[in-house]
Amino acid sequence: MNKRKKIGIRTLFFLSCIVFLFSGYMLLRNAVKYMAATDTYQALRTEVQSSTLTVTWKGSAKNGEINEVKTVLEPLVSMDFSSLLEINPEIVAWIRIEGTNIDYPVMQTVNNIYYLTHMYNGEYNNSGSIFMDYRCNADFSDKNTVFYGHHMRNSTMFGDLEKYKSQEFYDYNPNITIFTPEGDFVIELISGTVENGNYEFVRFDLENDDDFLSYIDELRRRSTFTSDVEVRADDQIICLCTCSYEWNNARYMVVGRLVRLYQQ
């Protein structure tokens, strides 16, 4: 083997080592950041989640008439929003899904960029936060309220939303809880659909009752699970959106009917 060839092999080996070490460093750095985010959010839960309570919720009412009353069998935690708002006044809600790691504050600011890379305390972290679309009203008064969150590889943030691609998981976890400073909600899930993130796939422009109900029917047809939740024209919905991996820039969107909780 000539000298030039030996030098070439050594150079290639050296460069391969550098790439290997750099890749290892990046993986370790990301793992440390993910662990830091997990610890930070867990500390917040410990601080603001208080004693359990029993709740009921009333089915959608029209003209002030109550159609149904349901009782939550499992206890739910309550949130200390006075402490949360002291930490950050941009905390507008808290979302919790049984059977998942989803148990986080929901942020909202003047754009949909900042909380992609910042936690609730303003610290930079690639895990980011769960956040409400800046175009939505923070009091959940819109026809459609939209949340976003990263699909983290360690199943944090909205990583566990993909569990709703399974009918069995939906059957055991058909509802989501939203806590807010003004009152709490249950989300009765309607659909989970894979969407194209290259386009604005969330509907903000629901024109009338017929358009709204047609949208719901279209979501049901494409849903990864089957739900028998009844949706009326005067109902409100909420969309939870995250990345999915069926193709480049795919998204997974879980949609539910928003119903206010009433504390016993």
Image (cartoon, rainbow, N blue to C red):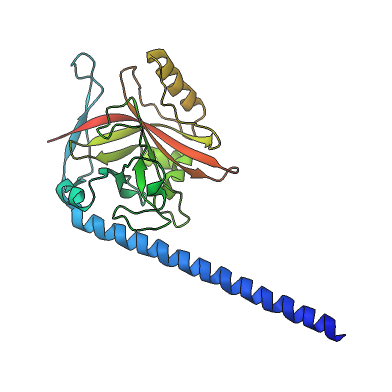
x then y, percent, for residue 122:
31, 55
249 shown above or below 13: above
User: From this viewpoint, is residue 212 visible?
Assistant: yes
- Along the viewing direction, whichever of 83 and 135 lies nearer the viewer: 135
Question: Residue 154, position in %: x, y?
Answer: 45, 57
- For this orientation, the residue located farthest to the left is 264
Q: Residue furthest right?
A: 2
Residue plotted at (52% across, 44% down): 244
Q: In the rendered picture of this protein, how many numbered marks are placed on residues?
A: 0
Residue 21 location (% of width, % of height): 58, 74
Question: What percent of the width, then of the height, locates residue 197?
Answer: 53, 38
Extreme-front residue of the structure: 110
Q: Which residue is located at x 18 percent, y 36 percent?
A: 183
Left/right of residue 237 with respect to residue 185 in the rendered view: right
Q: In this view, does 5 lie above or below 127?
A: below
Q: State the image quarter where residue 109 is shown.
A: top left
Choose between 62 and 211: the one closer to the eye: 211
Position of 68 relative to 119 (above/below): above
* Relative side of 206 to 70, left or right: right
Residue 166 in sight: no
19 sits to left or right of 216: right
Q: Quadrant of the C terminus?
A: top left
Give the quarter of the image for residue 145.
top left
Please state, as top left, top right, bottom left or bottom right, where the N terminus lies in the image.
bottom right
Determine whether 15 is above or below 201 in the image.
Answer: below
Q: Residue at horizontal 33%, vertical 18%?
A: 232
Camera-side residue of 259 and 70: 259
**Residue at the spot x=41%, y=26% of the render?**
204
